[in-house]
Image (cartoon, rainbow, N blue to C red):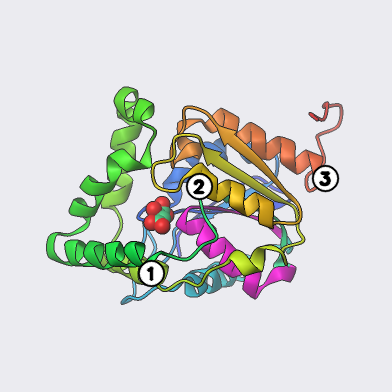
Amino acid sequence: MAYSDQGSGLPLVFVHGYPLNRRIWDPQLEGLSGEGRVIAPDLRGHGESSATPPPYSMDSHADDLRSLLQALGVPFPIVLCGLSMGGYVSLAYIRRYPQDVAGLILTATRAAADSSQGRQNRENAIHLAEGQGAAAIADGMLAKLLAPGTYDSNTRLVEEIYQIMLHTSLAGIVGDLMGMKDRPDSTPLLERIHQPVLIIHGADDQIIPVAEAKDMQAALPDAELVIVGEAGHLVNMEQPEQFNAAVTQWLRRTRLSPPPAGKEVDR
Ligand code: MLT
């Protein structure tokens, strides 16, 4: 697995979504490595990590992640942050290895499994990818990943995200789609997550509606919800300063990461 690793102290592990790679977390490597050790891997079949034949269950992505952290000698517990499919992987991780996790950040994600329509859409996407490749998937997803305002105004970001998607292998795309289609409903797990949770969601997310973030907050024992305006599904890239500030303030409020000496704590 390829990974980025920057900073020191509290491990902050960032898990990308589908069909993306660790490059989506560049603004967090830059903006949060003063708060802890920011680690962002490319999941199997994505970016610079090697691919194996599909399927890739969310549990297998979680196990890959744990093996990487162990190989790097990262001290547990960690703070785990997942975006969208990365959130599904993070929920699989905390279900399997709850003792590893001190805090959880769920971004642009949901706890529920796919609906029957959602499962059919996965099948259609598998056929499209197998017939026409990653570019057909990227073409279909690009506009939906961003808030309409970002898509119309930020051409540099639009191009960057398109290139990220083109770097996902066919096995990665199909493997994720099969794994997401069959993932279990994590809703019953939520009430058993006693670690602090921060939920961050773009107000204009076209892939996962804000209502799903509110549902998670209601079901979790200890969760805060931050809704970021003028942001869609890739809220961390569209509004990096607001995203990083939300994470920093939550880390300090929950005392997961103490403020540097002499700095005020936001409340
Ligand atoms: C993602 O961004 O990871 C995916 O859009 C999630 C999904 O398709 O359910």
Query: Circle 2 — which element?
Result: loop
Residue that badge 3 annotates = 255
Write down which quadrant ligand 1 falls in: bottom left
Provide the secondary structure element on which disc 3 rests.
Answer: loop
Q: Amino acid at mark 1?
A: Lys
Write down the residue under mark 1: 181
Residue occupying image coordinates x 41% and y 74%: 182
Look at the image and tell me in which quarter the N terminus lies. bottom left
Tell me the amino acid under the disc marked 2: Ala
Query: Cβ(mark 2) to ligand 1 < 8 Å?
Result: yes
How dense is the environment of label 2, judged by Cα within 10 Å: few (below 14), some, or many (20 and up)?
A: many
**Element carrying mark 1:** helix
Secondary structure of the magenta portion, mostly? helix
Is 92 contained in the magenta span? yes
Q: Which residue is mark 2?
A: 108
Q: Is residue 217 magenta?
A: no
- Pointers 1 and 3 in contact (C-beta within 8 Å): no
Q: Nearer the viewer, residue 41 or 155?
A: 155
Q: Is mark 1 within 8 Å of ligand 1?
A: no
Mark 1–mark 3 distance (CA, rounded to whole Å): 37 Å
> Quick one: label 2 or label 1, which is nearer the N terminus?
2
Q: Amino acid at mark 3?
A: Arg
Q: Position of residue 64 (x, y in %)?
A: 51, 71
- Residue at screen point 30% across, 50% down: 165
- In the rendered structure, the answer to whether residue 208 lies left or right of residue 98 reads left
- What's the magenta region? 78-99
Which comes before the other along the chain, label 1 or label 3?
1
Residue 266, position as x, y percentages in the image: 79, 28
The Cα–Cα distance between marks 2 and 1, rounded to whole angstroms, is 18 Å
